[in-house]
Image (spheres, rainbow, N blue to C red):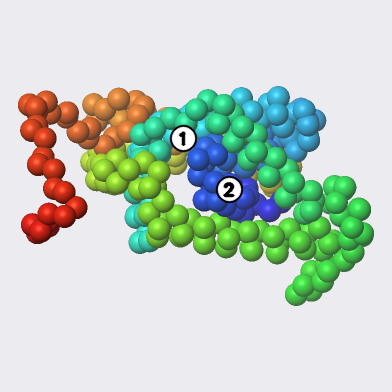
């Protein structure tokens, strides 16, 4: 491909870090998996999920639905049952439900995520126009006794390098506290300290395990399609598991799990005494 996860998110995370006010980062990342996720269904229908118009006609609604579910249902729940992983600050991602970007930003970001995926695959798929135009579609590369075509070899190199790039960018995002900048330190802290208890974790992971088991029964002749089918049902399982865990804990099905601050009404505050520039008094 490169493989759906980590490699294809490199452009998405990079764009969000470079221009945080321009993009919906969640939608960018979801869009970057959509063409491969679509394969789980479109393969049997003879539809190429990596070309227009199917990538938009089918991919955009799917991407918007997954973005909403990830942001408001799964993201607040999943970090509470995952390790924080040091500078990656995984627990901070529970803040994603704290604010909803403008609808047009989300739509455009999903489309851009889809586009980055398709463009990357132009270079690493046999039969795409880029290898033919650049003359490496018929090239052969032999590694450790295995011969691969030029696009296949580039696919392996691309997955390794782009996955490493994504992890490096996520490290930067966590290390520099970008989520604190974008959402506010208090909102991030509430998300980081949110907990639903051991029972919630059991329900969440149980639903994911059931999803993986069901997905493994949805077989396909091509291993990539089989993997994407398992992944799709796991996505559904994570959504069901998050809803189950939140309801069992008596919490709303959607939205942030962090405790909200209660506004306190205070009386009028007297204006501070003005200190002139030529005043000699010490100002702390």
Give left or right: position of 30 versus 199: right
Quadrant housing residue 147: bottom right
- Residue placed at 12% from the left, 54% from the top? 279
Task: Name the residue beneath numbered marker 2.
Answer: 15
- Residue placed at 89% from the left, 61% from the top? 136
- 276 or 189: nearer the eye? 276
Give left or right: position of 22 versus 60: left
Task: Name the residue beneath numbered marker 1.
Answer: 70
- 228 or 194: nearer the eye? 194
Residue 196: give x, y in percent of width and height. 25, 38
127 to 246, vertically: above or below: below
- Residue placed at 85% from the left, 51% from the top? 130
Residue 137: give x, y in percent of width and height. 89, 57
Q: Nearer the viewer, mark 2 or mark 1?
A: 2
Give left or right: position of 134 versus 218: right
Quadrant housing residue 39: top right
- Residue placed at 32% from the left, 33% from the top? 256
Residue 176: give x, y in percent of width and height. 40, 58
Cα gap from disc 2 to disc 1, whole angstroms: 19 Å
Say what secondary structure mark 2 lies in. helix
Precedes in sequence: disc 2 or disc 1: 2
């Amino acid at each position: 491909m490169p493989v759906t996860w980590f490699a294809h998110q490199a452009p998405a995370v990079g764009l969000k870090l470079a221009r945080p006010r321009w993009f919906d980062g969640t939608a960018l990342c979801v869009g970057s998996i959509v063409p491969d996720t679509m394969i789980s269904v479109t393969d049997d229908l003879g539809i190429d999920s990596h070309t227009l118009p199917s990538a938009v006609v089918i991919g955009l609604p799917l991407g918007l639905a997954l973005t909403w579910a990830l942001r408001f249902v799964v993201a607040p729940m999943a970090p509470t049952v995952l390790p924080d992983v040091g500078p990656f600050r995984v627990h901070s991602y529970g803040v994603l439900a704290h604010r909803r970007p403008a609808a047009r930003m989300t739509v455009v970001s999903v489309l851009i995520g889809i586009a980055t995926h398709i463009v990357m695959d132009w270079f690493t798929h046999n039969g795409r126009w880029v290898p033919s135009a650049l003359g490496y579609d018929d090239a052969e590369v032999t590694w450790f006794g295995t011969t691969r075509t030029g696009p296949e070899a580039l696919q392996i190199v691309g997955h390794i390098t782009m996955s490493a790039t994504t992890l490096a960018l996520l490290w930067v995002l966590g290390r520099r506290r970008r989520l604190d900048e974008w959402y506010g330190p208090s909102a991030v802290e509430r998300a980081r300290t949110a907990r639903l208890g051991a029972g919630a974790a059991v329900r969440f992971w149980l639903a994911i395990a059931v999803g993986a088991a069901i997905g493994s029964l949805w077989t396909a002749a091509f291993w990539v399609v089989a993997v994407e089918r398992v992944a799709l049902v796991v996505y559904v399982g994570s959504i069901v598991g998050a809803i189950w865990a939140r309801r069992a804990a008596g919490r709303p099905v959607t939205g942030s799990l962090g405790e909200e601050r209660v506004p306190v009404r205070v009386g009028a505050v007297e204006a501070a005494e003005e200190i002139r520039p030529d005043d000699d008094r010490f100002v702390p």
